[in-house]
Image: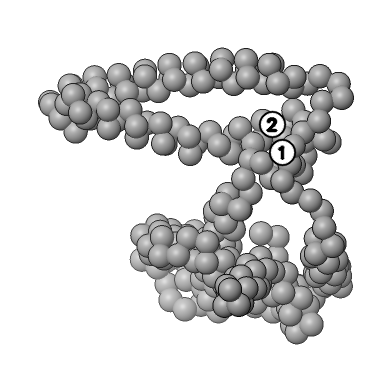
Amino acid sequence: MFLMHPVCLAISFICAVCYAIYLTGKKTVVFGLKYMLPMMIFAAAVNPLFNHQGVTILAYLPNGNPLTLESTLFGIAAAVMLVTIITWFSCFNIVMTSDKFVYLFGRVMPALSLILSMSLRLVPRFKAQIKVISNAQKGIKQDVSSGSFFQKARNGIKIINILVTWVLENAIETADSMKSRGYGLPGRTAFSIFRFSRRDYYALGYMSICVFIVLFGVITGAYHFRYFPSIRGSVSVFVFIATFFLGAFPLIVNLKEDFTWKRIESKI
C-alpha cells in the first residue's frame, strides 16, 4: 500500500492472487472476473481523465485536456494497489479466525481481542442467519420473492425484525455464558490449541529478515519510483527478491504442508 514501485506492486499482486486461488479455488477467479477486473479497469481509466500531469502526451481529450502516459501508468498502478489490498484482506479474513485473534491478543488485550473476534464473526453469522430466516419465510410464502412490491417490502422488513430479535437474544445469551464461565475474573485461564513451537521461531526469523531487507530498501531508496513529471525509478534485484519471498511466504508454507501431508499419506 505504501510502495508504488511497479515491480513491488506486481509481486504483491501475483502473490495475493495465487494465495487467494489456493484458499478458495475457482471462487476467487469468478469473483475477480466479476468484480475486481471491472473495478480495476474503472480505477485505471478514471485517473487519466482528472489527472493531466506528465510530459509524455498521448492524445487530447474532447475538452482539450491532455492524456498523458504518466497519468495513465499511475492510474494502472493505483488500480493494481487497490485490488491487491482487497485480495490480501480477503485472504486475511479466511486465515485469521476468531480463536487465533483471542490466542494472539487474549492475554495482552482481552477486551479488544474479544471485540475483534466478535466483529470478524458478525457478518458471516448475520449472513448465515438471514439465509435461515429467509428459507423459513419462503416455506410459508412470506419472503421477498413472492407477492406485490409492497408485500415484498413488508416481508423484507419482517425478516429484518426477526434478525434483530435474534441478534439481541443472542447477545444476552453470550453475556450470560461469558459471566457463567468467569470471564474477566482475576486468575482465569484460557484454553488454546495453539503453541509457539520451534518452527514458529523459524518462521518469525524468516519474516524478520525479509522485513528488515524491505525496510532497508525503503530507507536507502531502492523502492523509489516517481510517475510525475516523468517516469523514473531505481531497480534493486536483491530487495525485490526479498519482497517476493515475503509475499509468497504464506503460499510456500501451505504448499510445504500439503507436500508433507501427501508424503505421509503415501507411506500409510
Farthest front residue in view: 268
Q: Residues within 10 Å of mark 2 (few under 14, many from 20)?
A: some
Residue marked by disc 1? 102
Do the CB atoms of the residues marked 1 and 2 lie less than 8 Å apart? yes
Identify the residue at image location x=73%, y=41%: 192
Locate residue 75 relative to residue 247 in the image: left or right: left
Farthest left residue in view: 148
Locate residue 41 relative to residue 5 in the image: left or right: left
Identify the residue at image location x=54%, y=70%: 18
Residue 67 at what x, y percent from top left? 47, 71
Number of numbered markers: 2
**Is residue 251 among what the camera can see?**
no
Where disc 2 sits, the SS reads helix
Q: Is residue 129 above or below residue 65?
A: above
Residue 213 at what x, y percent from top left? 84, 72
Residue marked by disc 2? 114
Residue 66 at what x, y percent from top left? 48, 70
Identify the residue at image location x=13%, y=26%: 147
Q: Of 255 and 39, which appears nearest the observer?
A: 255
Q: Of 12 and 42, which appears nearest the observer?
A: 12
Residue type at tag 1: Val
